[in-house]
Image (spheres, coloured by chain):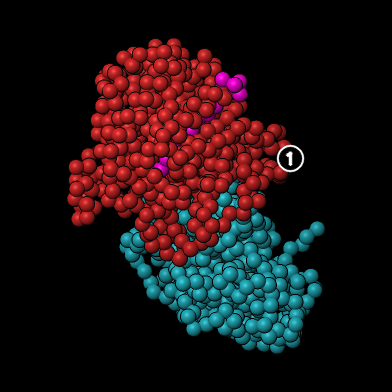
Amino acid sequence: MIGITGYGGYVPRLRLSRRAVVQANAWYAPHLSGKSKGTRAMASWDEDSITMAVAAARDCLGPGDDRTHVRSVYLASSTLPFSERMNAVVASEALTLDETIAAFDMGGSQRAALAAVDQAVASVKAGQGDALVLAADTRKTRAASSQELDYGDGAAAITIGSKHVLAEYLGTGTVSADFVDHFRKTGEDIDYHWEERWVRDEGIAKLAPQAIQAALKQAGVQAAQIDHFIFPSSFAMMDAQLAKRCGIRAEALVNALLDTVGDTGVPHALLLLAHVLERASAGQHILVAQFGSGAQALVFRVTDAIKSFSPAKGVSQWLAAGVEESNYTKFLSFKDQLRMERGMRGEQDKKTALTTAWRHRSALLGLVAGKCSVTGSVHFPPSRLSYDQGKPLQDTQRPYKLAERQATVLSWSAEYLSFHMAPPHHYGQVDFEGGGRILMDFTDIDVGEVHSGTVVEMTFRIKDVDERRGYTRYFWKATPVRSTTASTPPTAKE
Amino acid sequence: MATGIKDKVAILGMGCSKFGERWDASPEDLMVEAYTEAMTDAGITAEQLGAAWFSTHMEDVGVGRGGTPMSIALRLPNIGVTRVENFCAGGSEAIRAAVYAVAAGACDIALALGMEKLKDTGYGGLPVATVGTYIPQWYPNTVAPANFAQLASAYQKKHGIDAALLKRAISHVSVKSHANGSKNPKAHLQRPITEAQCLKAPTIAEPLGLFDCCGVSDGAAAVIVTTPEIAYGLGKRDLVSFKALQVSVSNGWEMQSNEWDGSYVHTARIAAKRAYAEAGITKPREQISMTEVHDCFSITELVTMEDLGLSAEGEAVRDVLDGVFDADGQVPCQIDGGLKCFGHPIGASGIRMLYEMYLQLQGRAGARQLANPTIGLTHNLGGQPSQNVCSVSIVGHLGA
């Protein structure tokens, strides 16, 4: 049996109030007043499709240090930060996956994530081991556009394998057709859209059913047997229309989270799938479909093993952890669409020495420290000589992963002096459970929230952006473990 | 077996420029200002100098690298000029090099000069420093106020001190330094302030406000050293000599191990202990007449009182509020205004601290002169609490 063996999601903490957007733009676009309801997920300035994919992958893979079962990684997105530098490999390094795995970037269409699942199934069928499918998007939109309100940022992850299958893969259906409902030229930031009525009636309503029917046929499942129907679309009632047209029961419609998260793009079908799997029961059928350059549909049947798995946090907890953001200018600034005054300190050159980055990639991307095999003391960054006072030992440190361990704030400050995208700039020293100390940036933090003793967890984020050369460097930051994450994920074992 | 530096080297002369926003002066002008005063005070000519050390930190906004900028600015007679750089403790390092050269007999008379030109950057605060190619890839883009502010969070937690009380104590530190600075015509900031002003000032780095941070200044300071015998031979009397020169440098233990609690400066305690041993001091609070410590931020001065053994651990808040370190207290601190008000031209600060000790010991400190000081201590810290260079020096009357 081949199918889904793990799932996870990620929704950034900030939820932009649509009312705030509509009100800010009311002088210009009063026609948007009907879209004032709810929020949309909004990535922080230090998040992109790579960092969000890593967050979703960690949610799926859990805190265990051993990830050697993953033999391939697919990263699907229409907003990959790099055209050259494989984005999936950056994610793979952050997840400390084995260097001998296969890695693929996929994009080009809203259905890229489902296409990636198809490929992952094929590789598992071919005996190549478990596959990790990641999808993430943080799309830019024009200010005062419908998309600005409809879209959201987010990520999802699933593993495909043949052991402990939670949802069996039953079949797929694909239509590849150059139906251009929207497009974006390489190098451009923002999608260009054609008329909505044509997209609905000639595009989705005609092409998606073909893919859905093909998938059902291959799966040997009747439309009426579908218990969860996932079809993300920001068009009102589109999924209901489609369900009706295909003979899928209205009760099977899955809430697309448009009121809170918005349409996250490529990851959205998998994000909803990860959400559904949290509550699905054995024997249920799931149909997940997505539209774009044609359409793709996949059918799964939930197995008895479903209860044996739970993601580290899960989509439900990410949803609950949201904080409403009503500063529209913050959104524009974080999306790099509003240039705030940075002062002279913002002029600092962020050129990255790629030689150095390669030499230290395990520490920088994987947050791998060095643990002395004699004394057990943990060093970050790892070094040839240990710090042990008075008796430094040489070449005794072994790789020791810190990313999944919680830490406690020893000292901190929040300052308004340096240039920072989200002032005040918080940082401080954190002590890891089991040893290790790093003076590091804090992120997703509110003023007054941190004190000496605050328990934090690690999150993979953008460290700096080199605007002159177009390079992004990544590192880990500390973020408070909050009460919304009631069932605190266990940290990795020694 | 090392015998230490005590009374082997004496000060022949010193000079210090006016510190502040010296829009009028180039780096070269600042050097000439301090050098001229020092040479006049010493009563010697350039040909009598055997070697020189030049302390400057920020070559990118100052005069560039190397010893040539000072040799050219001062038209030195082709003697060796070595640039030293050890963060904010560079001035003390220049002194140490000059003193050691004289003590070793390598030269008879040596010059140490520190200079920093910080106000050619276009903005307030310290310029952004470069830190190699690896550190920027993981370490936060920190600024000094937030690095030192972290002392406050850890100190508060360790000693269970109420945030408002700690804020009041560090405000007292700044009020005291402004009061002292108001009597110093060379100080950058000469206006007294009130505790209420401190408490109301805008936050720079939680919990430090504007008045918790020292001035960012242009300036230069110079010292000329020689042996007591040569000084006597040149007609000098009432000599001020070095009793101890100690430097301790972090090795990563504070930053990496989980043992340091973040509430004090580890190297300061080591350097102080070694300096007291070298100078033969056993009861610092009774034996030391006055201190110039590295009060880059008010919280730094407060914890330094404990690091130097002038306050018992956890007692600095009470001692500060009781006025122990005020101008009329038991151990006056920053009688010249300190980094806080005299100013902080980085490479010059260690020498500026010595300048005040020298003036006080010679009874030449004008309106701020203390009554009969005998031993002075300077504490010069470079870097940040978790990773730094710390110098502790002790000077006094020769034979005291």
Question: Helix, strand, or loop for circle 1?
Answer: loop
Residue B186 belongs to the span the image colors magenta: no
Towards the viewer: A330 or B169:
A330
Residue B197 appears in which quarter of the rendering? bottom left
Residue B146 visible to an observer of this rendering: yes
Report which colour depicts chain B: cyan
Q: Residue at x 36, y 57 (%)?
A: A338
Q: Is residue B155 above or below residue A277?
A: below
Image mark 1: chain: A
Q: Is residue B60 above or below residue A107?
A: below
Residue B56 appears in which quarter of the rendering? bottom right
Q: Is residue B400 left or right of residue B187?
A: right
Towards the viewer: B238 or B166:
B166
Could you tell me the amino acid type at mark 1? Asp
Q: Residue at x 74, y 40 (%)?
A: A395
Q: Is residue A407 above or below residue B386?
A: above
Report which colour depicts chain A: red
Q: Is residue B67 left or right of residue B57?
A: right
Residue A439 visible to an observer of this rendering: no
Towards the viewer: B318 or A208:
A208
Residue bearing the label numbered 1: A395
**In the image, residue A475 lies at what x, y percent?**
53, 45
Q: How many marks?
A: 1
Q: Residue at x 43, y 27 (%)?
A: A174
Q: Is residue A314 above or below residue B120?
A: above
* Residues in magenta, as a range: A125-138
**In the image, residue A378 lies at what x, y percent?**
62, 38
Q: Residue at x 62, y 73 (%)?
A: B64
Quadrant containing the C terminus of chain A is: top right
Query: Dot 1 surroundings within 10 Å: few (below 14), some, or many (20 or more)?
Result: few
Q: Is residue B299 left or right of residue A362?
A: left
